Image (cartoon, helix red, strand yellow):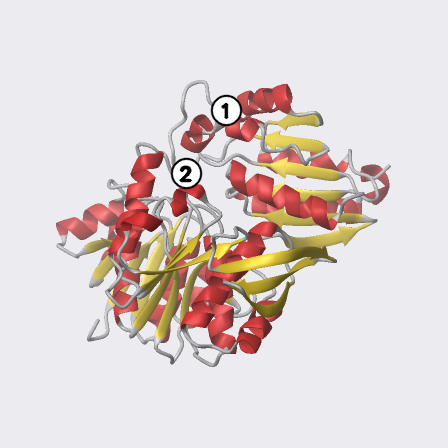
């Protein structure tokens, strides 16, 4: 954008939308937006100068030069309809992100079914440690930058690329990272082959001087390797990878490993977050750092100094010997990875999980996978599906999922119809030494704090 604009966001409180709004405000643009409720994200934008409306109304778009929408915004939204009548351009979030990427010399985009937010954050941490001062736009609250976005003075823009609706194909990065490919977002994609072809197209958009950073451990990503004509660095634990992790050691609260480039050992790296999935995420960031000629010691410091992202293996509280954690995991693959990391951290403690399914379409398509995803949990509380603007599907419910999980799960499974009642239900069953994880992408993010408050205020009643 070559002159200052008035940009209006429909759904400005979303984690991805609010990040774009933060950057535009930093650049001096006028920003307004609407959302159904106030959150800390919207209040932070207001403190920066944004005008935020509660609820949607046609008059909110008056005076806007462009209206930005996410995939969650329906075509019959009154603000979208008003913008079209007034001939105000209505663009998807990814198009605005692509426009911001063009303002920088080089874009780095991280895509994949799982691990995008953490990997993007690790890449940003490496570039920041290397003094490159990148612009960062991420779908999560990153501890190191105090939010989900920041504008840097350097030549690089590091962004999380959202494949959920295919809009990541609007981006033209210089470096593209693909963490994995999985059966996800089947409300948009026909099948796994459709997803693979979209990722292949994403990589084809790299310039001739560009680089693809691909996880060799993922078979669907590995399938992309023979078809491209761009430079590639592969990473993983596989001996076939260019950049490998060996001698992986689970340590208190984290994980350590030795990094190898082909047959040369680079050195050891220690992360403050546990899990094999985080080792792979760190390898992707290491690959980007190597490409940008950042010294290994600097990269190592950036990775070790990374303290995480909100709702990714996040510690909520410790009350009467009970540890409460929170994680965004909402896909079977993510749930298994989170519980494996939890078991590595606390091998001898009882693991209690509170899970809120997210979207009817995902629950329906992956019912069998969900049924086998909770093997690491000793006690599971499962609640109703968070719809995320979807219409219900007949026969698909949280209670049905609970029945399917019971068929394959050795531990106890309890269905709680309301997410708001999860904390109270769990509190009566907890005992000192338990580790509790709240999992999901919907409204369950607030349940962990509620549980801490209940345990702290009603400890005698809640804890036997």
Q: Which residue is nearer to you in this view: 435 or 392? A: 435
Badge 2 crowding class, 10 Å Cα cut-off, few under 14, some 14 to 19, many 20 or more, is: many
Judged from this view, the residue extending furthest toward the front is 263
Relative to residue 196, is residue 334 drawn left or right? right
Front label number (2 vs 1): 2
Which quarter shows the N terminus?
A: bottom left
- In percent of width and height, residue 91 lies at 23, 54
Residue closest to the eye, 297 or 358: 297
Q: Is residue 173 above or below residue 196?
A: below
Q: Secondary structure at mark 2?
A: loop
Residue 184 is marked as 2
Quadrant showing the C terminus: top right
Tag of residue 397: 1
Tell whether 326 sits left or right of 36.
right
User: Does 128 sit above or below residue 108?
Assistant: below
Cα distance in 3D space between marks 2 and 1 = 18 Å
Where is 106 relative to 409, above or below? below
- Find out whether the residues at labels 2 and 1 contact each other: C-beta distance under 8 Å: no
Residue 271: give x, y in percent of width and height.
Answer: 63, 63
Earlier-in-chain disc, 2 versus 1: 2
Give the residue drawn at x 70%, y 25%.
Answer: 410
Residue 269 percent location from the top left of the image:
62, 66
Left or right, residue 15 beside residue 453: left
Q: Which mark is residue 350?
A: none
The residue that appears at 35% across and 54% down in the rendered structure is: 34
The residue sitting at 45% across, 71% down in the picture is: 290
Residue 13 is at least partly visible in this image:
no
Label 1 crowd (10 A; few <14 / some 14-19 / many >=20)? many
Please tell me whether mark 1 sits on a helix, a strand or a loop. Answer: loop
Classify residue 116 by image quadrant. bottom left
């Amino acid at each position: 954008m070559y002159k200052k604009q008035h940009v209006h966001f429909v759904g400005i409180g979303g984690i991805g939308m609010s990040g774009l709004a933060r950057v535009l405000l930093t650049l001096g643009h006028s920003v307004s937006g609407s959302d159904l409720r106030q959150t800390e994200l919207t209040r932070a934008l207001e403190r920066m100068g944004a005008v935020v409306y509660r609820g949607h109304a046609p008059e909110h778009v008056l005076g806007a030069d462009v209206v930005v929408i996410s995939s969650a915004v329906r075509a019959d939204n009154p603000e979208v309809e008003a913008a079209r009548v007034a001939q105000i351009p209505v663009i998807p979030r990814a198009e605005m992100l692509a426009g911001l990427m063009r303002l920088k010399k080089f874009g780095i985009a991280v895509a994949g079914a799982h691990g995008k937010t953490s990997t993007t954050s690790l890449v940003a941490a490496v570039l920041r440690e290397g003094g490159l001062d990148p612009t960062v736009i991420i779908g999560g609250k990153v501890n190191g930058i105090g939010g989900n976005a920041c504008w840097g003075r350097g030549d690089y823009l590091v962004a999380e690329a959202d494949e959920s609706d295919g809009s990541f194909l609007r981006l033209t990065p210089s470096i593209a990272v693909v963490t994995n490919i999985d059966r996800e977002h089947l409300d948009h994609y026909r099948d796994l082959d459709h997803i693979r072809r979209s990722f292949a197209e994403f990589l084809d958009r790299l310039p001739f001087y560009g680089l693809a950073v691909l996880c060799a451990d993922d078979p669907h990503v590995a399938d992309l390797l023979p078809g491209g004509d761009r430079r590639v660095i592969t990473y993983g634990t596989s001996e076939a990878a260019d950049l490998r992790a060996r001698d992986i050691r689970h340590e208190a609260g984290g994980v350590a490993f030795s990094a190898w480039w082909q047959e040369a050992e680079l050195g050891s790296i220690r992360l403050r977050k546990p899990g094999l999935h985080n080792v792979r995420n760190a390898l992707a960031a290491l690959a980007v750092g190597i490409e940008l000629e950042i010294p290994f010691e600097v990269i190592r410091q950036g990775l070790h100094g990374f303290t995480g992202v909100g709702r990714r293996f996040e510690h909520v509280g410790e009350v009467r010997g009970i540890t409460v954690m929170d994680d965004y995991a909402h896909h079977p693959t993510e749930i298994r990875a989170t519980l494996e990391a939890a078991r590595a951290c606390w091998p001898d403690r009882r693991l209690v999980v509170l899970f809120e399914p997210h979207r009817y379409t995902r629950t329906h398509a992956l019912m069998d996978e969900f049924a086998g995803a909770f093997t690491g949990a000793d006690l599971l509380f499962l609640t109703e599906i968070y719809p995320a603007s979807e219409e219900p599907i007949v026969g698909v419910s949280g209670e049905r999922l609970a029945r399917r999980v019971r068929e394959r799960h050795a531990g106890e499974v309890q269905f709680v119809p309301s997410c708001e009642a999860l904390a109270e239900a769990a509190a009566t069953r907890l005992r000192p030494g338990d580790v509790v994880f709240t999992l999901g992408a919907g409204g369950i993010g607030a349940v962990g704090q509620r549980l801490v408050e209940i345990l702290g205020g009603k400890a005698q009643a809640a804890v036997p």
